[in-house]
Amino acid sequence: MTETLTIQRPDDWHLHLRDGAMLAAVLPETARHFARAIIMPNLVPPVVTAAQAAAYRDRILAALPDGFGFAPLMTLYLTEETDPDDVAAAHASGLVHAVKLYPAGATTNSASGVANFDRVRGVLERMADIGLPLCVHGEVTTPDIDIFDRESVFIDRVLDPIRRATPGLRVVMEHITTSGAVDYARSGGADLAATITTHHLVINRNHILVGGIHPHYYCLPVAKRETHRQALVGAATSGDGCFFLGTDSAPHTDALKLSACGCAGCFTATNTLSILAEVFERENALPRLEGFTSRHGPGFYRLPVNTETVTLTRGEPVTYPGAIQTDDGPVSVFDPGFPLHWRVTG
Ligand code: DOR
Ligand code: ZN
């Protein structure tokens, strides 16, 4: 059995770092293992302009403890007022690596997102021209659609029409949760990719609801039934370059999670690599872990693969803290529900 595994240093292609005290507490959890991350712009207020993205990047770098090498890859939050010239300039300067599409009302801080997709046509066409990826939260938000169907309906009614109307638009389907999304991502050619989270490789909807309600497993898109989780594991471990890691690690204080109306999000930054190694090992796919965490993402984003490495070592189960402490209160670390034998040792 393999006992050590050395891979190119991973990147996280979908990460929530928040701001202020939360940023200071969660940033080291990612920077410890990851070289770069695509930083989600759903702050309050959202990161809409290049100037806001530059200021947010500066706050992230200021919060980075000495000795950590970590590069935040900034995104802009797409609104119906987004200026194509501002987006193009932010991309040309090297500041912005993607634009994030939240359908209005889909998730945390998405009220400023897009309701009328015709109103962002000009931005999307400019992005297709310059090769700037669109990161898509793929869920419809109309109340008549069952929450478990929101992703598949979005692909049919929104994503596929947008892609047909905008040839050359490069799209990342984020945090996919269904076998239909796996199939769609696979069929899309070089301009389409999909990120998969750590938690969606581990939990299905029973984890949220059976034996009591488990708020720490509630995230968006909500986990689906077991057959879909298996399809995600199959995609992640397949070696197919269109699938790569985007943890969607999304910290909320326990007070906000353990509430009558709890926030969506799983905080996985701390133990993601241990969990992924366990998942890949179970599938006899450890040789393909590096592609998923470290190679496919740079390939799609047209960035170099990191030159440094990390080494994972197999041994007695590793324990992680149940929560990290922040000045806003504790944030529980995602519990995969099984022992983790792989730890990062170098
Ligand atoms: O679970 C989630 N949490 N899904 C999202 O789309 C947003 C995220 C957050 O910002 O908390
Ligand atoms: Zn997210």
Image: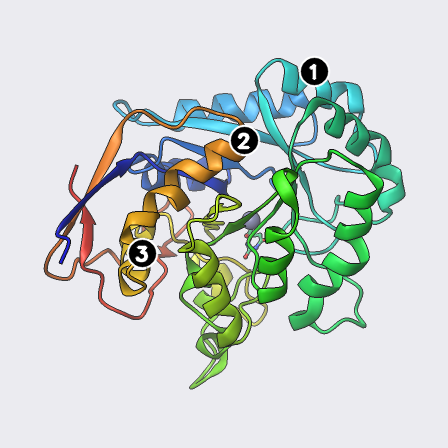
The percent position of residue 332, horizontal first and vertical second, equals: 36, 58
The reply to whether residue 114 is in sight is no
Q: Tell me what residue is drawn at x 69 percent, y 49 percent.
A: 110
Quadrant in the rendering for residue 147 = bottom right
Label 3 sits on what residue type?
Ala
Residue to which mark 3 is pinned: 285
The disc, 1 or 2, on the residue closer to the chain's N-terminal end is 1
**Mark 3 → mark 2, Cα distance in angstroms:** 24 Å
What residue is shown with label 1? 89
Q: Is mark 2 within 8 Å of ligand 2?
A: no
Label 1 within 8 A of ligand 2 by Cβ: no
- Camera-near label (3 vs 2) is 3
Q: Label 3: few (<14), some or many (≥20) within 10 Å?
A: some
- Amino acid type, callout 1: Ala
* Front-most of residues 299 and 335: 299
Depth check, front residue: 63 or 150: 150
The amino acid beneath tag 2 is Tyr
Residue 298, position as x, y percentages in the image:
47, 32
Residue of label 2: 301
Pointers 3 and 1 in contact (C-beta within 8 Å): no
- How packed mark 1 is, by other alpha carbons closer than 10 Å (few <14, some 14-19, many 20 or more), is few
Residue visible at 31% across and 70% down in the picture: 337
